Image (cartoon, coloured by chain):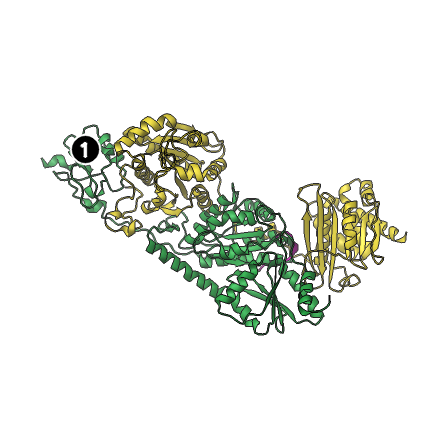
């Protein structure tokens, strides 16, 4: 009776049946029963079909949890699948995306504007093409978020105040994963909460910019300036083998410039970029010149943008197979090495003939600059080496200066976190002829002042104050 | 047809049977939920614009199977990641797929907030009353008395009662559609498929946040054969988690998403960038105060206007072509506390922005005078509000003190708020930091939206000048 078999009937390849028996209950005609034989490929016992009474209702197919399990198919008289190749054998091609590049749009920068550090960073972000901001209010970073809340709706962008820093960083994971520039502002306690998400971003190679206006800690600490997250940003970006480029501006102008740079670098390396400021730098109002361009962002080929071109993409940090995860780590490590090679940045002030070298970042570097000027007027040959990238530490630049240096003095608002980076960088570089390292350190929201730095040098030089 | 990959190449590189079978245990509810999702995506024709968020839990590998854009989230954070994707491309259809440990335990804050803000995403929540991937531990959804690896004597009153997510989400104002469905028989499965499809449809129509809770079987950790697990869900879970539509409303407002704007003119306008020439009035840097760097401290209570006055000084200095910074220091109170501002004006570049030993102090009240008068450096100037400051602390004989009844003058002018402008006038007259017109120009810039207040400010400034000159003569 071949004609009666022209109907489509339920069919299953026994290798794709796990024998859960949902289909048995579903069939009102008792067409399906548990088999007796263990499938040698799966070690499971698949169901057996007897379709004499099948009414083609399809309820058994609806009951099957396996994508390539029970399905309606053309079958032979013994109910084996004849068209297997058209079911499990087809290959649908996934479109291959191409990168839509950023466009650099010239603008008339006009006259310098007068803004505070956090505002300068926000303006840098919108100039760099950022139209998505997610954040949670925390002093002393909040003004940056507030300006974004004002600007972005007018630019048809998105500002969302998240339920926490944890949620905020994961919203960045989504928008960054979709390939668009996005950012957040936070401060130390909030940054701690974001570390989980930053680890995922680094693992999944998701770009975004995190501005951390560091404040006094540990714990709730206070809202005054500190630099005590250097350890976190350089050595502790969540779990796993993580690194990110860390930019350390020292003026409102650099808050704008480095925020724009951060967006460039985060997409260049598909890795989050952290910008660290201190509470002073967030609050300080100063003169800021605008650049002569802005960015209209494109969409990278790897993005999960939610359109046909990018359908084949995946943003994930999981590799369940050890070999795969080791391969991901090696790939990331190679990327860190490329960043360490290409992105070391620093600035020097009166270093050409310096014998004493101050090393400082952020606002303490401004204090140190003042000290250099004062000490130079006294004839003391002192200079300032200012790391612009806390990671990668600009060790090559530092080493090229050290030959002439007889004393290093590290100025920082932390308990030696910058000094640790210096010592570690020199040690890893194999530089052994390190001059003595002294320091000026303040904590708890107090920055080292110019006169303290001057006094320290006087003391070291044996001069009467 | 469905939205499953033709081969699961991410599942053990698609080798052997894994290329076409899931990693789920026999009888697991995830497979069915995946299937209904894949069919719905296909039927709605949204495969190319769908983004599926894989959670942490057994369904972490959702991305092995769904031939859509895929993003894998941290534990519990899928709704936040979903919002990030949806906002990046509002044309996309974003699905947050989560289990009960992910959504109802570690990710409670994220799901409640996502539901509360109500953006159009679709959440599929698999409730099987237990942790699957970590090996059968207690979930927030575990039934009372139920034994798990971490409730070996049964869930008791130390472990709380089951968390009813669908009811919880439904009682919030923003979500538009919440339903709880099950998988234990044909009728439930048809309803489950319908609910999942509806949750996606509502997003396609840009209507709002939808949430489908699926009561699912975990035969492995219930230690039951698959068929018995279905019975268990029906007989034990359903009485605790009643099935049905919990909420289905029309949104009060549809979402109107726009493409971000990248026109330079609009951006520059918003930033306040201007190419207008600023007039200069000063002959040069006020070297009579300091050859390179002048520091000022303005101190008072919140509301005295110290910060605004400080900003006006900074603006004046920058208009004159010098570098200048202002940094505030507030007390912990937002209003009414102490409010100090440090200002630097430098011929070349401001280095340290703080003013621990200022050249000039403007004190708006007695505590500020007491606290900072002694810090003013030799040859410096103190300007105080004589209306409220009655005791002058001992200072170095080289320090000049100029007392001006700032509050009285401002009251006479009918607006106490202009007290800080009176102070600026006094500053100009007492120090000749910058010319009068230079300050007034900055005041004018500062009042750009409130130009009608300018004459009053000019008068306040002049009264401050006069009072300072009078004070010096005394």
- Is residue B386 placed above or below A390 in the rendered structure? above
Measuring 59% from the left and 60% from the top, which residue is drawn there?
A: A361
Q: Is residue B445 left or right of residue A58?
A: right
The chain carrying label 1 is A
The count of marks equals 1
Q: Is residue A255 left or right of residue B60?
A: right
Measuring 40% from the left and 38% from the top, which residue is drawn there?
A: B101
Range of residues picked out in magenta: A282-291
Single out the residue that lies furthest toward the front. Answer: B153
Q: Position of residue A121 (x, y in %)?
A: 58, 53
List the residue tagged with mark 1: A32
- Quadrant where the N terminus of chain A sits is top left
- Is residue B442 placed above or below B159 in the rendered structure? below
Single out the residue that lies furthest toward the right. Answer: B474
Q: Quadrant of residue B3?
A: top left
Chain A, which colour? green
Which chain is tinted yellow?
A: B
């Amino acid at each position: 009776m071949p004609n009666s078999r022209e109907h489509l009937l339920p069919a299953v390849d026994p290798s794709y049946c796990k024998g859960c028996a949902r289909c048995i209950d579903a069939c009102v005609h008792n067409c399906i029963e548990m088999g007796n034989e263990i499938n040698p490929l799966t070690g499971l016992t698949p169901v057996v079909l007897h379709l004499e009474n099948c009414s083609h209702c399809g309820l058994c197919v609806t009951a099957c949890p396996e994508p390539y399990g029970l399905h309606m198919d053309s079958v032979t008289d013994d109910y084996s699948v004849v068209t297997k190749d058209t079911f499990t054998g087809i290959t649908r091609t996934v479109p291959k995306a191409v990168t839509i590049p950023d466009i650099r749009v010239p603008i008339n920068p006009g006259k310098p504007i007068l803004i505070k550090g956090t505002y300068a960073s926000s303006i840098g972000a919108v100039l760099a093409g950022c139209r998505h901001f997610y954040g949670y209010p925390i002093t002393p970073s909040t003004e940056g978020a507030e300006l974004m809340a004002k600007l972005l709706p007018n630019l048809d962008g998105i500002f969302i105040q998240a339920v926490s820093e944890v949620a905020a960083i994961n919203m960045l994971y989504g928008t960054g994963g979709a390939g668009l520039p996005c950012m957040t502002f936070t401060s130390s306690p909030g940054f701690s909460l974001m570390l989980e998400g930053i680890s995922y971003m680094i693992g999944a190679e998701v770009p975004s910019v995190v501005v951390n206006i560091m404040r006094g800690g540990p714990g709730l600490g206070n809202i005054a300036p500190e630099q005590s997250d250097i350890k976190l940003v350089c050595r502790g970006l969540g779990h796993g083998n993580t690194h990110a480029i860390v930019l350390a501006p020292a003026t409102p102008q650099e808050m704008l410039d480095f925020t724009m740079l951060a967006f460039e670098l985060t997409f260049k390396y598909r890795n989050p970029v952290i910008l660290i400021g201190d509470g002073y730098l967030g609050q300080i109002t100063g003169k800021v010149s605008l650049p002569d361009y802005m960015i209209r962002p494109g969409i990278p080929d790897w993005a999960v943008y939610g359109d046909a071109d990018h359908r084949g993409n995946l943003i994930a940090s999981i590799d369940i197979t050890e070999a795969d995860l080791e391969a991901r780590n090696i790939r990331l490590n190679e990327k860190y090495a490329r960043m360490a090679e290409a992105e070391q940045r620093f600035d020097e002030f009166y270093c050409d003939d310096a014998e004493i070298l101050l090393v400082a970042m952020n606002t303490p570097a401004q204090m140190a600059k003042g000290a250099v000027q004062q000490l130079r007027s006294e004839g003391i040959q002192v200079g300032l080496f200012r790391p612009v990238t806390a990671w990668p530490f600009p060790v090559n630049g530092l080493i090229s200066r050290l030959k002439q240096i007889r004393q290093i003095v590290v100025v920082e608002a932390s308990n030696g976190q910058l000094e640790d980076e210096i010592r570690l960088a020199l040690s890893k570089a194999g530089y052994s002829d390190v001059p003595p390292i002294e320091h000026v350190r303040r904590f708890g929201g107090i920055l080292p002042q110019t006169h303290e730095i001057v006094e320290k040098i006087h003391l070291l030089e044996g001069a009467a104050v | 047809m469905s939205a499953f990959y033709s081969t699961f190449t991410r599942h053990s590189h698609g080798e052997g049977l894994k290329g076409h079978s899931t990693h789920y245990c026999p009888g697991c509810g995830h497979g069915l939920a995946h299937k209904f999702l894949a069919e719905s995506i296909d039927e709605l024709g949204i495969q190319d614009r769908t983004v599926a968020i894989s959670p942490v839990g057994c369904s972490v590998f959702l991305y092995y199977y769904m031939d859509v854009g895929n993003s894998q989230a941290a534990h519990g954070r899928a709704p936040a990641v979903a919002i990030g994707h949806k906002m990046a491309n509002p044309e996309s259809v974003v699905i947050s797929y989560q289990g009960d440990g992910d959504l109802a335990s570690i990710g409670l804050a994220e799901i409640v907030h996502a539901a509360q803000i109500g953006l159009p995403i679709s959440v599929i929540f698999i409730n099987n009353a237990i942790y699957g991937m970590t090996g059968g531990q207690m979930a927030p959804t575990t039934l009372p008395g139920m034994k798990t690896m971490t409730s070996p004597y049964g869930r008791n009153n130390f472990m709380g009662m089951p968390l009813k997510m669908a009811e919880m989400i439904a009682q919030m104002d923003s979500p538009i559609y919440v339903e709880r469905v099950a998988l234990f028989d044909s009728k439930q499965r048809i309803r489950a498929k319908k609910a999942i499809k509806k949750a996606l449809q509502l997003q396609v129509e840009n209507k709002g946040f939808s949430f489908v809770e699926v009561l699912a079987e975990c035969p492995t950790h219930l230690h039951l054969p698959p068929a018995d697990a279905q019975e268990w869900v029906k007989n034990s879970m359903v009485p605790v988690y009643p099935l049905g539509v919990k909420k289905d409303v029309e949104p009060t407002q549809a979402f109107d998403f726009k493409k971000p704007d990248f026109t330079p003119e609009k951006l520059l306008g918003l930033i306040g960038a201007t190419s207008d020439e600023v007039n200069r009035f000063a002959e040069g840097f006020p070297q009579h105060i300091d050859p390179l760097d002048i520091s000022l401290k303005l101190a008072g209570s919140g509301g005295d206007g110290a910060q605004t006055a400080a900003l006006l000084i900074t603006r004046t200095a920058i208009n004159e072509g010098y570098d200048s910074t202002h940094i505030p220091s507030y007390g912990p109170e937002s209003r009414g506390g102490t409010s100090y501002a440090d200002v630097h004006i430098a011929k070349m570049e401001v280095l340290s922005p703080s003013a621990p030993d200022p050249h000039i102090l403007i004190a708006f009240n007695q505590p500020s005078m007491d606290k900072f008068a002694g810090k003013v450096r030799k040859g410096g100037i103190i300007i105080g509000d004589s209306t409220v400051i009655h005791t002058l602390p001992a200072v170095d004989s080289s320090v000049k003190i100029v007392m001006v009844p700032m509050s009285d003058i401002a009251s006479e002018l009918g607006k106490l708020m202009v007290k800080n402008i009176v102070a600026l006038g006094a500053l100009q007259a007492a120090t000749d930091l910058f010319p009068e017109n230079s300050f007034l120009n900055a005041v004018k810039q500062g009042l750009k939206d409130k130009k009608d207040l300018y004459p009053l400010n000019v008068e306040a400034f002049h009264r401050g000048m006069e009072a300072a000159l009078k004070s010096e003569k005394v």
